[in-house]
Image (cartoon, rainbow, N blue to C red):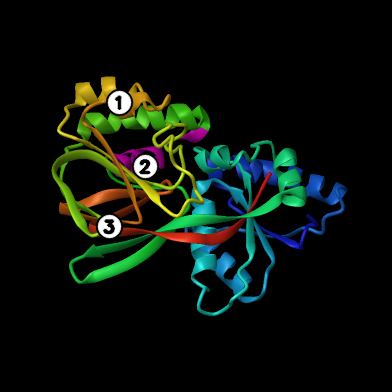
Amino acid sequence: MSINKPYFIVNPHAAHGKVGKQWPRIIHYLRTEGIAVNADVTKSRWHAYHLAREAAKSGAQLIVSVGGEGTFNEIINGILSCTTQTKLLPEVAMMPIGTGMDLARILKIPKDYKRAFDVVRTGRTTLMDVGKVVFRTGKRAWHRYFANAFDVGLGGMVVRISNNTPKNLGGFLTFLLSSLVSLVIFKRLQLKIWIDKKHTDNGLMTILGALNGQYFGGGMHAAPMASPDDGVLEFIYVKDTNIFKFIVHVLAKVYTGTHLKYKNVYHCRGTELRVECNKICLMDVDGEEERAREVTVSVVPKAIKLRVP
């Protein structure tokens, strides 16, 4: 496939500033490959969203995310905000340089920027599902899309801690240590859940996730059965378990996908999840923090065009 005038959106702060340090080398490499570099560097949170939105409205054909999953999340949100304004949305590619690049692992996109650019240049186009989350707190409501994972409960606490932790430990250790610290201070939530409009369960839950991809949290193989283009989401939750049992039966086994054998881990699949919390609580959307009391999560089939190997 020929390359179609790529527009690079670069988050220099991703991976504890690693992207900012590598970007000059990446520019030099791109120019030696004959690429006229059209790029913008983000200056604040949600800047990537606005850059992607304007690019989509201007008719961009290919947007390349240079950064982590938070950068990619902002870009797909910016693109999808234009669905009523343009019928031809741009294709998205990634050069994954971030803390927890689970989506890159799922899509088999290399972390090495030269090999990742080979995917941008010669890869194929696929259509990928995304999840849409509608948050509600009192009379206020807002929405956000995710490419890989959403969760409520422990994951929101992990994200809050990991996003304020130096990232030089790497994704695996950053999320593992953040998970252990979170377990010490986290209190289980009283949740009510509905799947595909049917009341499914309620009770004290540690974490409840809606997963589009197999991995999240820096390599946790949380949903081995997931596929990002099958039109459904995997809903996995942990109920009625204490810290010790969670560490032994869930955290210690989730990296190999064997946590699903534990009796207090529940798995369902569907196209919509509604959750009511007993209080405003922390939530995780592709590694970014949100807070709400009620959410509705739904799948949007084949919503984005993605360049993959």
Q: Position of 87 compared to 135: left or right?
A: right
Q: Which amino acid does label 1 sit on?
A: Lys
**Residue that mark 2 sits on:** 159
Which residues lie in the magenta part? 154-167
Question: Taking 146 as reference, is 114 left or right?
Answer: right
Which of the 4 quarters of the picture holds residue 258?
top left
Give the quarter of the image for residue 300: bottom left
Q: In the picture, which quadrant includes the N terminus?
A: bottom right
Q: Which sits earlier in the primary sequence, circle 1 or circle 2?
A: 2
Residue placed most toward the observer, 243 or 164: 243
Residue, disc 3: 196
Question: Which of pointers 2 and 3 indicates the residue nearer the eye?
Answer: 3
Question: Where residue 224 sits in the image (x, y, percent)?
Answer: 43, 34
Q: Is mark 1 on a helix, strand or loop?
A: helix
- As rendered, which of 215 and 183 lies closer to the eye? 215
Picture coordinates of residue 103, whole percent (x, y): 52, 43
Residue at x 54% of width, y 53% of height: 72
Instruction: Give the total number of marks visible in the rendering.
Output: 3
| Among numbered discs 2 and 3, the one appearing first in the sequence | 2
Q: How far apart are marks 1 and 2 (CA)?
A: 26 Å
Residue density around tag 3, few if under 14, some if 14–19, many if 20 or more, within 10 Å: few
> Which disc is residue 261 wearing?
1
- SS for tag 2? helix
